[in-house]
Image (spheres, rainbow, N blue to C red):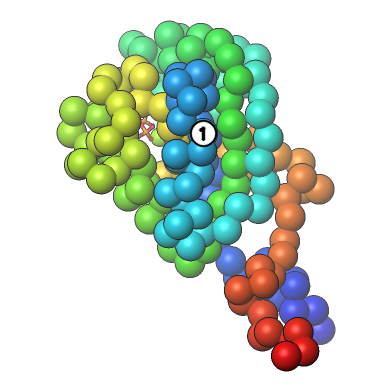
C-alpha cells in the first residue's frame, strides 16, 4: 500500500518554470517567485544553472525549425537560469496564466510578462505548456533526487500543545 507521502506525490501536478537570463539579471527572481508562492503553489525544486547551448537546444527542441531558434538557444545559455519545479492543483495551466502571453505586448497587465517585460525575445520566464512537456522538462532539468516531496505545515493539522 502507498504511504501518505507517496499518494500525495503521485497525485500532485507539477510544472517546470525557469527564470531566463534576462529575468535573473534584472533582479526579478524574488518578484516572480513571490507570485507563485502567494497564489499558493508549492516550490519542490530549485537551482541556478548556466545551461550549455546544446542543453538549450534540447530544451527548445520543438522550435528548431523557427528562424529565432539559434538566437533563442544562444540567449538561454548566455547566463544563469533559475530552474524550478512548482506543484499544485492545476499548476501547469494556471502557471501559464500567471506568466501571460508569449509576446509581452499581448500579455495582460497583472501577468508576469505583462507587468515586467516588453519584447518577445526578452520575456524573462519559461513555463511548461502541458502535462507532457512538464514531465519532459522536469526530467531534462532535474535528477529525481533533486525533487522534494513534502506536506507543508499549512496542510497538516496543528499538533502543537496549547
Ligand atoms: P512560450 O511557451 O510562451 O515561452 O513561447 P514559445 O514556446 O512559443 O517560444 C519559446 C520562446 O521563444 C519564447 O518565450 C520567446 O522567448 C521566444 N520566441 C517565441 N516567438 C518568438 C519570435 O517570434 N521572435 C523571437 N525573437 N523570439 C520568440
Ligand atoms: Mg513554450
Label 1 crowd (10 A; few <14 / some 14-19 / many >=20): some
Residue 162, horizontal then vertical, whole percent = 73, 90
Q: Is residue 157 left or right of residue 121?
A: right
Residue nearest the observer in this picture, 154 or 89: 154
Residue nearest the observer in this picture, 109 or 134: 109
The residue that mark 1 highlights is 29
Q: Is residue 118 left or right of residue 26?
A: left
With respect to residue 68, does 35 lie above or below? below
With respect to residue 54, does 62 lie above or below? below
Residue shown at the point (36%, 13%) measured from the top left: 68
Q: Is residue 138 left or right of residue 74?
A: right
Residue 9, horizontal then vertical, whole percent = 68, 66
Q: Is mark 1 within 8 Å of ligand 1?
A: no
Residue shown at the point (81%, 84%) measured from the top left: 1
With respect to residue 2, does 145 lie above or below? above
Q: Residue furthest bottom?
A: 162
Residue 29, horizontal then vertical, whole percent = 51, 33
| Ligand 2 - quadrant of the structure image | top left
Number of labels in the image equals: 1
Q: Is residue 54 visible?
A: no
Q: Is residue 110 visible?
A: yes
Residue shown at the point (65%, 19%) measured from the top left: 50
With respect to residue 149, does 5 lie above or below? below
Q: Secondary structure at mark 1?
A: helix
Residue shown at the point (68%, 35%) measured from the top left: 47
Q: Residue furthest front?
A: 162
Residue 16, horizontal then vertical, whole percent = 54, 44
Q: Is residue 65 left or right of residue 1?
A: left
Amino acid at each position: 500500500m502507498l504511504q501518505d507521502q507517496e499518494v500525495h506525490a503521485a497525485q500532485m501536478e507539477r510544472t517546470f518554470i525557469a527564470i531566463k537570463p534576462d529575468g535573473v539579471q534584472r533582479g526579478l527572481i524574488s518578484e516572480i517567485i513571490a507570485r507563485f508562492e502567494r497564489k499558493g503553489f508549492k516550490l519542490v525544486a530549485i537551482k541556478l544553472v548556466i545551461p550549455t547551448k546544446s542543453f538549450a537546444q534540447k530544451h527548445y527542441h520543438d522550435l528548431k525549425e523557427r528562424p529565432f531558434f539559434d538566437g533563442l538557444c544562444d540567449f538561454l545559455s548566455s547566463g544563469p537560469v533559475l530552474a524550478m519545479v512548482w506543484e499544485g492543483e492545476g499548476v501547469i495551466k494556471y502557471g501559464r496564466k500567471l506568466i501571460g502571453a508569449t509576446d509581452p505586448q499581448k500579455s495582460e497587465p497583472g501577468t508576469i510578462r505583462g507587468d515586467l517585460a516588453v519584447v518577445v525575445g526578452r520575456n524573462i520566464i519559461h513555463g511548461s505548456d502541458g502535462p507532457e512537456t512538464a514531465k519532459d522538462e522536469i526530467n531534462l532539468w532535474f535528477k529525481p533526487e533533486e525533487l522534494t516531496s513534502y506536506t507543508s505545515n499549512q496542510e497538516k493539522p496543528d499538533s502543537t500543545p496549547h
